[in-house]
Image (cartoon, rainbow, N blue to C red):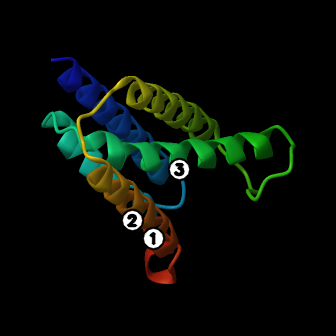
């Protein structure tokens, strides 16, 4: 029962990140880029709402990735060194807070959840999720996607 509760928490956090990034897409450059960037989140969302323990290991790299991106944006907004630049609207700044909080809560749930998954499956999920998330970000900047 506890496992199902944590899986739904993580799925909900991933869904909150996904929706917030869709909102950013709607008010900024266009939604296709953000839809591509968030594709990896669908795996832990589906697995988590189905109560699968492997959802933890798919969600953690994605949530850590998005929390890291938000930290770099916040650094830029605070005038600290950051790879980000440009202008962020009030809606975009608000969505960075939503993404950051949802990511942090999901990571917290992941550390609390003792999912019953063998280490080979867990490591494989972490590696695949990480590769998928980085690749999705990279693909989202290709001209045919970024310019739509």
For marks 2 and 3, give the CA distance. Answer: 11 Å
Q: Is residue 53 visible?
A: yes
Q: Are marks 2 and 1 in contact (CB under 8 Å)?
A: yes
Task: Read off the residue under disc 3.
Answer: 65
Q: Quadrant of residue 51?
A: top left
Q: How many marks?
A: 3
Task: Read off the residue under disc 1.
Answer: 135
Nearest the camera: 9 or 112?
112
119, above or below 131, in the image: above
Quadrant of the drawing holding the N terminus: top left
| Residue at x-position 44% and y-position 49% | 62
Toward the top, the furthest residue is 1
For marks 2 and 1, give the CA distance. Answer: 5 Å
Q: Position of residue 22 (x, y in %)?
A: 40, 48
121, above or below 51, in the image: below
For marks 1 and 3, give the CA distance. Answer: 12 Å
User: Which element type, helix, strand or loop, lies under badge 3?
Assistant: helix
19, above or below 31, in the image: above
Q: Position of residue 21 (x, y in %)?
A: 45, 46
Q: With 59 as the anchor, is 46 left or right in this view? A: left
User: Which element type, helix, strand or loop, lies under badge 2?
Assistant: helix
Q: With 138 as the anchor, is 1 left or right in this view? A: left
Quadrant of the drawing holding the C terminus: bottom left
| Residue at x-position 78% and y-position 46% | 76
| Residue at x-position 25% and y-position 52% | 43
Q: Position of residue 63 (x, y in %)?
A: 46, 43
Q: Quadrant of residue 126?
A: bottom left
Q: Is residue 39 visible?
A: no
User: Which element type, helix, strand or loop, lies under badge 1?
Assistant: helix
Nearest the camera: 42 or 106?
106
Q: Quadrant of residue 34?
A: bottom left
Task: Read off the residue under disc 2.
Answer: 132
């Amino acid at each position: 029962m506890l496992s199902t509760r944590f899986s739904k928490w993580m799925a909900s956090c991933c869904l909150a990140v996904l929706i917030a990034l869709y909102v950013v897409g709607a008010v900024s450059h266009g939604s296709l880029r953000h839809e591509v960037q968030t594709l990896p989140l669908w795996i832990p969302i589906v697995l988590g709402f189905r109560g699968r323990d492997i959802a933890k290991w798919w969600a953690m790299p994605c949530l850590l990735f998005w929390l890291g991106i938000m930290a770099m944006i916040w650094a830029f907004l605070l005038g600290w060194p950051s790879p980000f630049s440009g202008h962020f609207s009030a809606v975009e700044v608000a969505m960075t807070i939503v993404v950051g909080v949802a990511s942090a809560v999901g990571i917290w749930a992941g550390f609390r959840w003792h999912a019953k998954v063998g280490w080979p499956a867990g490591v494989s999920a972490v590696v695949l999720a990480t590769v998928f998330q980085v690749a999705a970000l990279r693909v989202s900047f290709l001209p045919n996607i970024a310019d739509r």
